[in-house]
């Protein structure tokens, strides 16, 4: 998959290009419908699919106080899109100059860069350009003028509520993983690089991968979880602690995510891994001694193995 970092770079892709445009935080099932519309157009017209999003998030520039907690990093977005077999990702730089661009000028720039522009697929309610003046109706007008198709994809509902990143954040914050999985269409995971930790887990006999958390993330509640840890194309079973490690020297001020992988003895330092949350085992606790903590870890591992063994039956 090709990574593009400017609108002009669209010319590097052979057309017709099917653009799916939006913020796509979480890549939930509603977002996937927008992408599928572009994929179907590309299939029919032997074109390529490019997902276009903005980096940084527009709210981070325009209204940082309203910036929501993120469900995924740009790197995680790219990983999932690769699995969806998208041909390219355009990480369009966003600043106040871009925000002030009249919507018609914005569309003309896209059409001029693509060789050619086959379609634009967006959520039906999507708005863009200066003052959010652009909408799907303006896109349709310009599509007729510049000869590209437009797909305004209706919001996808689960029951009587529209699937949204906001709903997923609400559910994730309370640990409602069944709802999160249903809305995402996959299990929730955090992608991060394995970094050097205090290596206390190794001293206790349970070495852990200390996974760097992204900036401003939406996290599930602190606690201990049965997890899968994916490194490249290999998945390992394990347990993970998310929280402040209160037993260890008074704890950490910021949340820490560390995972113990079953039956693994390699070195993951510097590698990007995805920690996929399967089931919450217990709250994070402060223990009277490291021996008590070690005994609890043994119990956590046993409980997690029972969960994984049950899933294999």
Image (cartoon, rainbow, N blue to C red):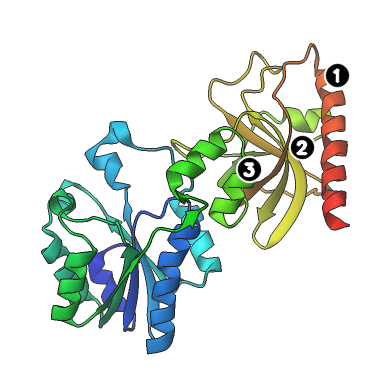
In this rendered view, identify the residue nearer to me: 73 or 45.
Answer: 45
Callout 3 secondary element: helix
Instruction: Say whether marks 3 and 1 touch (CB < 8 Å).
Output: no
Spot occupied by residue 218 in the image (x, y as percentages of width and height):
49, 37
Callout 1 secondary element: helix
Q: Is residue 34 above or below residue 263?
A: below
Q: Is residue 74 above or below residue 172?
A: below
- Label 1 and label 2: CA atoms lie apart by 15 Å
Q: Residues within 10 Å of mark 3 (few under 14, many from 20)?
A: many
Closest to the camera, between mark 1 and mark 2, is 1
Closest to the camera, between mark 3 and mark 1, is 3
Residue 81: tell me if it is visible.
Answer: yes
Q: How many discs mark residues in the rendered view?
A: 3
Q: Earlier in the sequence, mark 3 or mark 2?
A: 3
The residue carrying mark 3 is: 177
Instruction: Say whether marks 3 and 2 touch (CB < 8 Å).
Output: no
Spot occupied by residue 92 in the image (x, y as percentages of width and height):
29, 59
- Label 3 and label 1: CA atoms lie apart by 31 Å
Instruction: Say whether marks 1 and 2 touch (CB < 8 Å).
Output: no
Callout 2 secondary element: loop
Closest to the camera, between mark 3 and mark 2, is 3
Q: Is residue 279 left or right of residue 89?
A: right
- Label 3 and label 2: CA atoms lie apart by 27 Å
Residue plotted at (55% across, 39% down): 171
Q: Is residue 200 left or right of residue 3?
A: right
Q: Is residue 2 left or right of residue 117?
A: right
Q: Quadrant of residue 35?
A: bottom left
Q: Is residue 202 above or below residue 245?
A: below
- As drawn, the residue found furthest toward the front would be 160
The residue carrying mark 1 is: 291
């Amino acid at each position: 998959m090709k990574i593009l970092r400017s609108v002009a770079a669209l010319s590097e892709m052979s057309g017709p290009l099917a653009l799916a445009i939006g913020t796509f935080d979480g890549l939930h099932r509603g977002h996937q419908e927008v992408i599928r519309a572009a994929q179907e157009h590309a299939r029919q017209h032997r074109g390529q699919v490019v997902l276009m999003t903005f980096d940084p998030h527009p709210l981070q520039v325009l209204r940082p106080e309203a910036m929501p907690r993120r469900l995924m990093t740009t790197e995680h977005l790219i990983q999932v899109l690769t699995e969806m077999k998208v041909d390219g990702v355009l990480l369009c730089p966003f600043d106040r100059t871009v925000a002030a661009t009249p919507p018609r000028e914005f569309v003309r720039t896209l059409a001029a860069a693509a060789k050619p522009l086959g379609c634009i697929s967006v959520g039906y309610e999507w708005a863009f350009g200066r003052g959010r003046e652009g909408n799907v109706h303006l896109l349709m007008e310009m599509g007729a003028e510049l000869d590209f198709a437009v797909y305004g994809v209706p919001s996808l509902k689960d029951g009587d509520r529209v699937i949204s990143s906001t709903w997923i954040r609400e559910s994730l914050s309370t640990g409602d993983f069944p709802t999160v999985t249903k809305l995402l269409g996959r299990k929730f995971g955090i992608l991060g690089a394995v970094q050097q930790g205090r290596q206390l887990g190794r001293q206790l006999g349970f070495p852990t991968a200390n996974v760097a958390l992204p900036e401003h993330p939406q996290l599930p509640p602190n606690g201990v979880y049965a997890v899968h840890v994916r490194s490249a194309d290999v998945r390992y079973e394990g347990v993970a602690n998310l929280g402040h490690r209160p037993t260890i020297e008074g704890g950490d001020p910021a949340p820490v995510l560390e995972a113990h992988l079953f039956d693994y003895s390699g070195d993951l330092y510097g590698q990007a891994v995805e920690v996929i949350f399967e089931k919450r085992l217990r709250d994070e606790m402060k223990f009277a001694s490291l021996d008590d903590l070690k005994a609890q870890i043994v119990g956590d591992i046993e409980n997690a193995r029972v969960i994984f063994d049950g899933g294999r039956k």
